Image: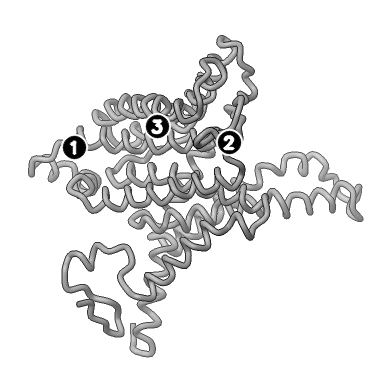
Amino acid sequence: MTSHCPAGTYDANYGQDSSIARTQLQRVFLIAGIILIFAAPWYLGSDLLTQLNEIGIYIIVASGVFIAISCGIVNLGQAGFMCIGAFTSGILCSTAGFSLWGALPIAIIASGLMGVLCGLTLSRIKGFIAAVVTIAVGIIIPEMFMIILPMLDLPAEAVSLPEGISIGGKVLGSQGVYLLIWVLVLLTALLVLNLSRSKTGRAFRGTRDNELVSEAVGLNIRRHKIVALLVCSILAGIGGWLWACHYSSISAGAFRFTLSLECLGIVVLGGMGSVGGIFIGSVIVLGIKFALSNYLLPWLEDMFMTGPWYGVLPLGDLIGRLGGITPLLLGIIFILVFTFSPSGMVGWWNKFKTYYRLWPLPG
């Protein structure tokens, strides 16, 4: 039976320790959160649903980065793996008559193979060079598709899918696509939780913490790095496929290198040791991007281009380049969070809970 004290909750067996929700209050919040998420299409507008769709896709893709980091791999090429999943689906649907469901397994295989190839390389190198390899993957793959698409008589700017995803012959609308994305989000969260608590997950963490010790106790660290990149790339490929399902049009510009940085920032911002941190980090990062693009930038443009400040300050060229303000502000936020809470938002929340449980006792 779970015991309670002012400093926290303590478990009496492994089942309680490994449960997703450890207390009754946590179970209530978890169930209420799931209900609110799946009821969202009936009480939110289309703009917010689109934002929630992007958050869900980012959660799936960032979960792959979480797996790679748990094995000691700093993956900065997740946008490349995602690009493979998206464009494989788009090419098959546009040129070979595949449905999106038929393209899904091939997209998973294609992104998974690239993950294995990347894992074979990373298993032989360490440190800074390993991160450079993943950066190369994230930059080269979108450029590669820009060359391949014209060879297939497809526009390099954007590939349009002939029809949306369907179930039982009925094409899913925006509500159906939303529900599909969030069902896969929950399945991904369960997969990552179970993998983290499995023998393989413990081997990942051992490889990350000390490769020499892991090898000394008999762990095959090369194999574990390959498996980690395989899972990481498959989740990115699924995210790319969902991107194609959601937008019905894909372009290489959507998978720029900054997407990889955002996914890495989501994991670190939320908390590298927590699956829940992926959800928190995705909401924060995508929420900031949404607020900047829909509120702050239009307000600045109205003020300096057409409003009372027009012509007062020579800011026309600056306003035209304000698209770069999003990664700038995200970078500032990341620096502040990492400085004051290196364990991310989840670590800050845990410290806060410990503080109010012990107050007014001295820390």
* Residue 124 placement: quadrant: top left
- Residues at circles 3 and 2 in contact by the CB criterion of under 8 Å: no
Q: Amino acid at mark 3?
A: Thr
44 or 337: nearer the eye? 44
The residue drawn where x is 14% and y is 44% is 214
Q: CA distance from mark 3 to mark 2?
A: 37 Å
SS label for mark 3: helix
The residue drawn where x is 14% and y is 42% is 212
| Relative to 268, residue 28 above or below | below
In the picture, the disc for residue 171 is 2
Q: Residue furthest left?
A: 217
Q: Which residue bears the numbered disc 3?
A: 134
Q: Amino acid at mark 2?
A: Val
Q: Which residue bears the numbered disc 1?
A: 221
Q: Position of residue 337 (x, y in %)?
A: 48, 60
In the picture, the disc for residue 325 is none
The residue drawn where x is 20% and y is 33% is 223
* Image quarter in which the N terminus is found: bottom left
Indicate which disc, 3 or 2, sits on the residue closer to the N terminus: 3
| Relative to 167, residue 301 above or below | below
* Image quarter in which the C terminus is found: bottom left
- In the image, which is nearer the foreground, mark 1 or mark 2? 2
| Relative to 334, residue 341 above or below | below
